[in-house]
Image (tube, rainbow, N blue to C red):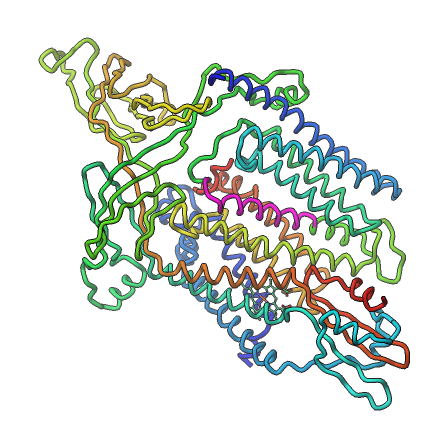
Amino acid sequence: MLYKLFSSLKTSVYILIFMSFMFLIGTIFPQGGDIEAYIEAGGKYAAVVSALDFLDIFMSPLFIFVTGILVLNLLACLYDRLKLFLKLKRKPIDFEKLKAHPGTAVLESIDIEERLRGMRFKLKTETKGRWYPGVKIYEKGLQYWWLSWFYHVGIILAIAGFFMTALFAVEKAVVLYPDKPETISLYSRDTRWNRFLTDMGMELPEQSSKEEYVLTLKEFRTEYYQGLKIDYPKDRTERFLLGAGLKKIEPSKKGFSYMPRMWLTRLFVKEPDGKVLDAELRVNRPFRTGGLTLYQMGYEQNAKLLVHPVGKKDLSELSNGVKDETIDVEARVPFQVKEEKGKFVLGSFRVGTLFKKDGSTEDIAPFTTLYYIPEDKPSEREVLGQIGPDRSLEAKGITFALKDFKEASYLSYRKDPGVWLVGLACLFVFLGLFIRSLGAWYRVQLAVEGRTAYVLISTRGILADKDRVIKKLKQ
Amino acid sequence: MNSEEILIKDAFLLGIELRLFWVVAFLYIICFFIGVAYLITSKQTYGRTLTSGLWITAVIHTILILFRTFEGMRPPFQTLYETLSWFAWSVNITYIYVQRRWKEVFLPGLIVAGIAGAACIYSLLTRSPVIAPVPPALQSPWYEAHVIVAFLAYAVFVVSFSVEVCYLKFRIPADETPGIFGCVDEEFHRWTHRLVLLGFPLLTFAVFSGAAWANDAWGRYWSWDPKETWSLITWTVYALYLHTRAVGKWRGTPASLLNLLGFICMIMTFLGVNWLTKLLNIPSIHTYAV
Ligand code: HEM
C-alpha cells in the first residue's frame, strides 16, 4: 500500500507542488536573516516565521523531510520501473484495432519489412494470429524509458550532492596584505556535520595541521576600464525624441569614469606537506590544489588619515580645543572627525592600471573621493573632493592628508566535497533529458494482409519524423 | 583617435543604434496590430502579413543585435537594456523557425509580437543604453553559455505559451473543420508539449551552467538567492507540466494551465525578481544586471 503510494507519479506531482510553495516562501522571506532583524523591519508574522524556519527554510526540518520523501518517491519509482523495464513485455495491438486506428497508414506490403530493416528497425516481438494476420513490433532509436530512468537517477545524485555540501562544506575568507603571510585551515568545527557531532556530545579535535596552508601575497593588482559617460535623459518623452531623431545624444561633460576590469592576485601557497606553489587567481578563475579552492572576491583598502584645522601645520600650533588627529580609515566605512557632527567616508581608491579607450594603459596614482554625510540626512553624500597619498584636501575648515595607503587582496576559500557529485549528477540529468527530448525513437506496429500492410507508428523525441518513415516505406 | 574623439564616435553610434531599436520596437507593435486585425476578421491575408512582418522585423532586429555587438565589442546581453532586446529577438527567431511547419496557423504570432514589442518598449523607456564594458564577474565562458541557453529556453517557452493561449481560447473538437486556429485540437496540444520538451533541457542547462559559473566566481554553486530560487520554481513547474502529460486525467486543461503558470514563473525569474526584491527589500546578488 505504502509502496504503491510512493511509486506513483501522482504522489510526485503533489510533492513537487508542495516543494514549489516552499521555494516560493524562500523567495519572499530573506534567507539567512535573523528573526530580530525581521521584526525590526516590520515583519508581522514572527511567530509563524520562527516556528517554521522561514528565514532558513531550505535547511528547515520540514524542507529536509519533504526532500526525503521526494527521494523515497524517486527511489520507489526507479525500482518499480527498473523491474518493469528489465522484463519489458511488448504487447502488439490487436489486428482489428490496428486496422481501425485513425493513425494507421495503409501501404503496399511488398518488401516492407526489408525496408524497415534497411532503415535499421529491429524486430522486437510479434503475435501470431489464428484468424487474423499477426502483428509485429519493430523499433529504432535509444529506448527513451532508459533515458528517463537515467535522469531521474541523476536527480537523486544531485540531491545527495547538495546534502554533502550542506553538511561538510567549509567556507571562509582571508585578507592578504603585502608582507603578511596568513595561515588558513580547511578544518572547521563549524560545519553542520561537526556541529551535529558536538551536539551529540562528541569531542572534536581543535585543529589539524594536515589541512593548513600558508598564503603569502606576491602581488595584488586592480585594473580599470575607462568608462564611457553619456548624458542619457531620464525623462521618457525625451528618450522618445532621441529615438525619433529629434534630439541628439551627447557625451557627458563629466568625462570618463573608472570601471572595474579585473582583480588579480599572485601568491605563494605552502601546502600542508611543505611544498610551495606559485599561484595566480582572478575573478572567475579560482586556484585549486588538493581540497582547497581559493577565490578572488575583492579587495580591502585602508590608510591613515591626518586631520587638522586648515592653516595649522603641526600639533604645537593647535589651539581652541581642536585636536589634531590621526584616524585609521577604510574605504567605504564612515568615520567621524572630532568636533564635526556629521560623518565622512572615503570611496574606493582608484589604483592600479587604467585601460584607456584609445588602447593605451596608464598607471593610476592612488586617489579617492571624500564624502561628507550630514548628521540629519544620513543617506546623503556630499562630495568634498579628491584625495590621495600625494594630494591632500581642504574642506569644511579641515585639512585632510593621507598616508600609509595599503591595498589587500580579499580571498575566500572553500572545501566542498559535494561539488563533484552535483557536477556528475548535472551531467546525468542534462544528457538524459536532452537525448530523451531531442533524440528520435520509433515503434512501428505492422500487420500484413495479402498485398496490404497496416502500419502504425509511434514516436518519442522532437527529431522523430513519422511522415518521413511512411514516405520511405512507400517508395 | 584620442579618448575624447572615441567618446564622440561612441555617442554617435549609440544615437544610430537607438533609432534602429525604436524602428524594431514599432515594427513589433505594427505586427501586433496586424495580428489583431487577423483575429477580428479571420482573413488569411492578415495572417500571412503578420508572419511576413515578423520575418522582416527579425532581419532588422538581427542587424541591431550585430550592431550592438560591434559597438560594445562584447556579447550583447549584459545589461537589462540589452537582455530585453535579446529576449525579444530570441522569441521572434524561435517563433518564425517553428512557424514554418504550421501552414495555416498565424495566431500565436500575435502574442509573440505583443511580448517582443512590450519588451523592446520597456527597455527603451526605462533602461539606459550606455555600453558598459564587461565587469570581472561576467568574464567567464559559463556566462555566455548560460545567457544564450537561458534565453533560448525562455524563447521556446514563450512560443509554447502563445500556442497554448490560442489553443485554450479557440480549441475545436477534432471532428470539426479547423477555424481561425488553422488546426485541430490535439495537434496543437502536442506542439506545446514538444516545445516544452525542448525548452526543459535547455532550462536545465541554463540552471546548471549558472551554478557552474557561480561555483567559479563565488565558490558556491547555489546560494538560494531569489533569482536562483525562482529559476528552480520555473523548472519545477515545467517538470510538473511534463508529468501531468503522463497522467491520463491531467493531460488536458490542467496541463495547459501549468504551461501558462510556467510562463508566469519564467517572467518572474527574468524580470519579477528584481521588482520583488526591491518591494520586499531582500538582498540579491543577481540584481547587478539591472
Ligand atoms: C525533481 C523531481 C523530478 C523531475 C525534475 C522529473 C523530471 C521529469 C521529466 C522532465 C519528465 C518528462 C520527460 C518525458 O516526457 O519523457 C519526467 C517523466 C516521468 N517521470 Fe519524472 N521527474 C521528477 C520526479 C519523478 C518522480 C519522483 C517520479 C516517480 C513517480 C517520476 C516519474 C516519472 C515518470 C514515470 C515519467 C514518464 C516517463 C517518460 O515519459 O519518460 N518523476 N520526469
Spot the residue most to the bottom: A130
- Looking at the rendered structure, the number of numbered marks drawn on it comes to 0
**Residue A420: x %, y % from top left:** 41, 60
Spot the residue most to the left: A316
Spot the residue most to the top: A311
> Which secondary structure is most common in the magenta stretch?
helix
Look at the picture and state if A468 lies above or below A133: above
**Residue A213: x %, y % from top left:** 23, 51
Does residue A406 appear left or right of residue B121 in this picture?
left
Query: Where, quadrant-wise, is the C terminus of chain A in this rendering?
Result: bottom right
**Residue A115: x %, y % from top left:** 79, 72
Q: Nearer the viewer, residue B132 or B225?
A: B132
Residue drawn at (65%, 31%), measured in percent from left and top? B64
Q: Nearer the viewer, residue B10 or A41?
A: B10
**Residue A150: x %, y % from top left:** 55, 68
Does residue B80 appear left or right of residue A159 in this picture?
right
Look at the picture and state if A469 lies above or below B29: below
Look at the picture and state if A62 lies above or below B217: below
Q: Ligand 1 quadrant?
A: bottom right
Residue drawn at (59%, 68%), measured in percent from left and top? A147
Q: Which of the 4 quarters of the picture holds residue B136?
A: top left
- Residue B155 is one of the magenta-drawn residues: yes
**Which stretch is magenta?**
B139-159
User: Does the rendering let one see residue B32?
Assistant: no
